[in-house]
Each structure stands twice: as C-alpha cells, then as structure tokens.
Image (cartoon, rainbow, N blue to C red):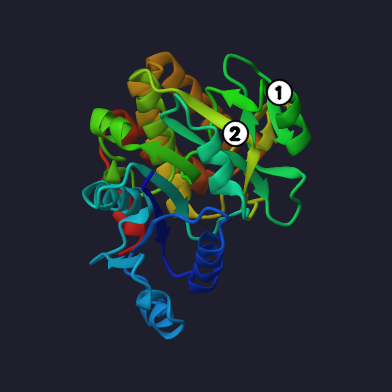
Amino acid sequence: MHVCAVVVTYNRKALLARCLKALLGQQRPPDRIIIIDNASTDGTPAALEQDGTLARPDVELVTLERNEGGAGGFHHGLERAMRSGAELAWLMDDDGHPAPDCLQRLLEARQGLDLWGPVVLDDKHPDQLCFPLRLPRSSRILRSRRAVEEACTEGLLPEVVMPFNGVLVTRELVAKIGLPRKEFFIWGDDIEYVWRAARAGAQIVTVCGASFYHPRQDDLGAPMFFGLMHFNNTGSLLKHYCLCRNNTANLLAYRGRVAALVFAAKTLWFYTFSRPSLARLRLSLRALAAGWRGDFSGHRRFIE
C-alpha cells in the first residue's frame, strides 16, 4: 500500500521541521513525502537543504510561484501525489503533527473507507480537541477526547472527519470527485471536499484511536446568541473574508439558499451584538456577497 504524505507550508519552517520529524518517525512511515511550499519568504527551502531533508530520496519539495493558500497547496499536492502513483494520500498542514502510531492506526481501519482521519487534539492540552466537533444530524458538540471516545462505535465516529489534518484519501475517491478547489485559497476548501465526497457516497469516518496534534486557535467557536450558538471569529482580515465567502459558497452548493441566508444572519448578528464592529460588518457583507456571486478573486487584495 503506497502512501504519499502531502504537507502544505508557508513561512513556518520550524513547525514544518517538527511535522516532518513526526512523519519520518512514524511506526509505519509514509512511502513518500511531498512538501508544497507556497512561495515562503522565510528561507524554508534553504532550511530543508541544510538539515538534510532534501537529500532523502523519499522527500520532494515543490515550490509554487506564488502563495496559493492551503487550498491551492492541497490541490497541487494531491494532484502530484496521484501522478506519483500513490494509492493513498495523507494530507496535512505544516503546523500539525501526527502521533507516532497515527498512520499505522489509520491503515488498520482502512477496509471499506474512502476518506478518514484521526482525532485532532490541542497540542498543548491533548485531552481536549483542537476544533469543536459537531455530530451529524445533532446539535451536540464534542470538545474533549473523552467525549469523542464515548461517541464512537467500534472505535469509529461515522460521517465525521476533521479534513486536511492527517486525513487519508484513496486514489479511487480522487478519480471520482477530483481535487480541492484552489480558488478558495484558505478556509472552507477542506469542508467543501468532504461534502463533495459525501455527496458522491464516500465512506467517511474518524478513527478514535489515531491522534493528530495541532495548535488551538482560542477564538474558534466563540459563543454568541446567549451562548446557544458559536461563530468562528478570527483576528485575520484575510481569514475572515475567506471564511464568510467560502462558507456561503459551500452552503449554497450543498445545503441550499436558506442555509446560506441563516449563516449570513448569524455573521451579521455576531458583529452587531456579540463582538460589535462596523469594519467587520462591512467586510462580512462584501465577503457574503462574493460567496453568493461565486466570485473568488477578492482575497488577493489582502496578500498583494
């Protein structure tokens, strides 16, 4: 079983080194590692050359001409992995890293699965999830490893996965549904890929015995509407714009106009009442409108 790990990086050479060390130290290491460098300016290629990583025959560095975000990185990385003959692609960003037995445990659970991944834990508090996890067709939100284990059936959590954080995807699924949408740039491209896979009938699960560690972002899942709802607030204007635009596009494509309108109302409520900000309201309206129109060009003004 040929497994190709795809790691997307941008200006985080220290975290990338940690991720690569964890990949090379796996009990069952990947057969190949493809690093997609989003035109980093922090000396990432030189650091990889200096520490001997690029001298390894099983490691390939691909440097893009410009920063295409996580979405573009995973688009190019998954395409290259498939061209290299990989049967499975193992996808992750540079700031996460797998536990030593992560890949082994994922492979042990492989039978009949198309897209599956580990439990994604806060790297500083590994008893807690890095990202809140909502169970399908339920209002229940899981926040701890223990809660995940209690919700599992025979070691699996069906229909749920934290995409592009150590997930495995089969060659057959990629042939069926294609590559991640690079025009999304960041935020939402991973969810879109999972929803696309689910619509195509893919078997999607979280393997409760496999662990992946990732830094926690404190304002994800910020409470709103008297604590009854949560919103993924971010200090980055780029991320905020892409979140609102891409989530709107995803909801229109997979959940319908009503769901997209509900998200718009939720966003406007958050920046009117929960975290009042006229600037964020204006930015939200521009991004929501772009998502409704299917215009994926607006994020470039934040990075050029």
Point out the image quarter for the N terminus: top left
Q: Amino acid at mark 1?
A: Ala
Residue behind mark 2:
207
154 vs 247, nearest the viewer: 154
Q: CA distance from mark 2 to mark 1?
A: 12 Å
Residue 273 falls left or right of residue 12: right
Quarter of the image where one finds residue 69: bottom left
Note whether 53 is above or below 96 in the view shown: below
Of the image marks 2 and 1, the number of the one nearer the N terminus: 1
- Which percent across, then down, holds residue 278? 53, 44
Q: Amino acid at mark 2?
A: Val
Q: Which residue is mark 1?
A: 151
Q: Measuring from the top left, give residue 198's x and y in whole percent.
A: 40, 22
Q: Is residue 159 left or right of residue 220?
A: left
On the question of residue 66 being in view, the answer is: yes
As rendered, which of 6 and 194 lies closer to the eye?
A: 6
Residue located at (26% from left, 64% from top)? 64
Q: Is residue 269 placed above or below 235 in the rendered structure?
A: above
Question: Which quarter of the rendering shows the C terminus?
Answer: bottom left
**Residue 73 in the image, given as x and y percentages of width and height:** 33, 54
* 88 lies above or below 207: below
Query: Is 177 on the left-hand or right-hand side of 123?
Result: left
Residue extending farthest bottom: 50
